[in-house]
Amino acid sequence: MDGLARMNIKDVLSDPVLFCSRLTIVDKRGRPVKLRLRSEQIQIIEAMAAGDDTLICKARQIGSTTAVAAYFFWRWFTAPDAQTYVSLSHKLASSKHILDIQRRFYNSLPRALHRPLSVDNTTTMTLADTGATLMAHSAEGKGGLRSFTATGLHISEYAFTPNADELKATAIAALNGGQLCIESTANHWGDPLHREIELWDAAMVDWNFLFFPWTDHVEYTEDPPDDFEHDPDRDMTRGQQFWMTKMMGKLGEVKFRREYPLSVDDAYAQTDGAWIEAALLKDIQVVKLETEGGQLAKLDHNDRYAIGVDCGAGTGGDYSALVVVSAMSGHVVDIRRSNRHTPTEWAEVVADASRRWKDAKVLTESNGTWGGVIITELKHVGVSLWKDAEGKDWITNASSKPKMLEHLKDTLLRCSIPVLDSWTIGELRAFKVDDRGNPFCPRNGIHHGDTVIALALALQCIQKVSVPNRPYLPEWIIHKRINAARGRGAMKEMRRY
């Protein structure tokens, strides 16, 4: 390690940034060089040194995998006892690659720091004196990670992992309170990394989330020719703009934005097979609400309203959702959702919403698992319910579902819904189209499309709601006018002529 003669070894061993910056890696030309930590790598190491579980979304080739491997190598090398640090992936080859990086760290240590290994093979390195272990493992390995407890665990390129839920569950079970780091570039909307980001954004999981745009990476620039036209409105240098233009020419704009994003939204701007393209939603004002939803507009007494309802079991899985739509404007004015209310309790929430929104008409499907419960409860308390021309309740089937979703899509394309909450936007983005052209919401994400279905039902319901011709007058004005009219009548009776 450079400078060890001039520095106290204990100072280096106690500081992960100082320690990691003295490790050796192989550069792109295959030459051994010192790990010169970039600003992104220092941020990663410092964040992990704080002890939090860390989730990283980043551009290609910023060295995040190397940084995490170096941090856990430092933890392993300085561990006072038999701690275990694991590189975990779906395929063992990927994990072995990370362990190879760490073995190179070990082999290049100065002689003064070399310590013998009791185990050294393609999947394990164990220090003889402390018993601390570095390990490469895969979710496919026999027995998983059940045979031991990991102190720290690293999952790389998580967005590309099949059976990601199983991999994460394996990791959490093995950690038992230890430190987890997941890092990856983006793959597609709704991928495993994106689901974790959405869970974090909804405050449903506790991550230390780090995002690194490509413009933070000093190597992503190139001297442009004199005739290159630089856009001064872009927050980047001429060299960065020229490099971006060249890379877009090689990869295409969509792939470039995914692999070299400027923001998380940029990384997940589009996905193959999307039901609605992201560009079609860009004009919608996105409001940040709690997961449970909230009110988007004030009550207008001259207006009338309709409510669409989707109901879940209330056991923590699918959400029950209701969406209130204005008959006058067609805008969404209220959104509510819960995955903890039972169907009977959700019926009470719907009834209360109907009363608050001027006895709004309600549409819920009658053939769902819980739709009949909702309809029965709402009938009992006198809520106005949607009926078809034959007086029957709504039935969602292979014919009506595509039609109501197509009507919703057409409404969005006409920009008739100017405001939605971020959760509903996420659900819309999660919808895909199957091989037969039918829209569906995949079940492998946090969004199951419940609010989208409620919104589509609300738009069906609003077609049977009419707006009164006479303007609304508050009760006190009506009573005042009645009393005034009565007074004028009494005066008329007193006249002699």
Image (tube, rainbow, N blue to C red):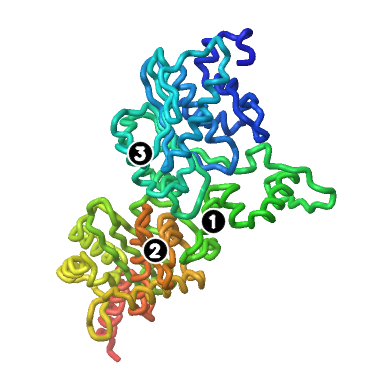
Relative height, residue 395 to residue 96 (above, below): below
Q: Residue at x 27, y 89 (%)?
A: 496
Q: Which residue is mark 2?
A: 333
Looking at the rendered image, the disc whose residue lies closer to the viewer, 1 or 2, is 1
Q: Are marks 1 and 2 in contact (CB under 8 Å)?
A: no
Q: Which residue is mark 3?
A: 141
Relative height, residue 189 to residue 14 (above, below): below
* Nearer-the-camera pick, 83 or 456: 83
Relative height, residue 226 to residue 364 (above, below): above
x, y percent for residue 194? 45, 49
Q: Looking at the rendering, in which quadrant would you find the N terminus?
A: top right
Nearer-N-terminus badge (3/1) = 3
Nearer-N-terminus badge (1/2) = 1
x, y percent for residue 41? 57, 31
x, y percent for residue 467? 37, 78
Q: Amino acid at mark 2?
A: Val
Crowd around label 2: few <14 · some 14–19 · many ≥20 (10 Å): many
Quadrant in the picture for residue 283: bottom right
Dot 1: element: loop
Dot 3: element: loop
x, y percent for residue 221? 71, 42
Nearer-N-terminus badge (2/3) = 3
Q: Residue at x 41, y 36 (%)?
A: 88
Q: Which residue is mark 1?
A: 269
Q: Are marks 2 and 3 in contact (CB under 8 Å)?
A: no
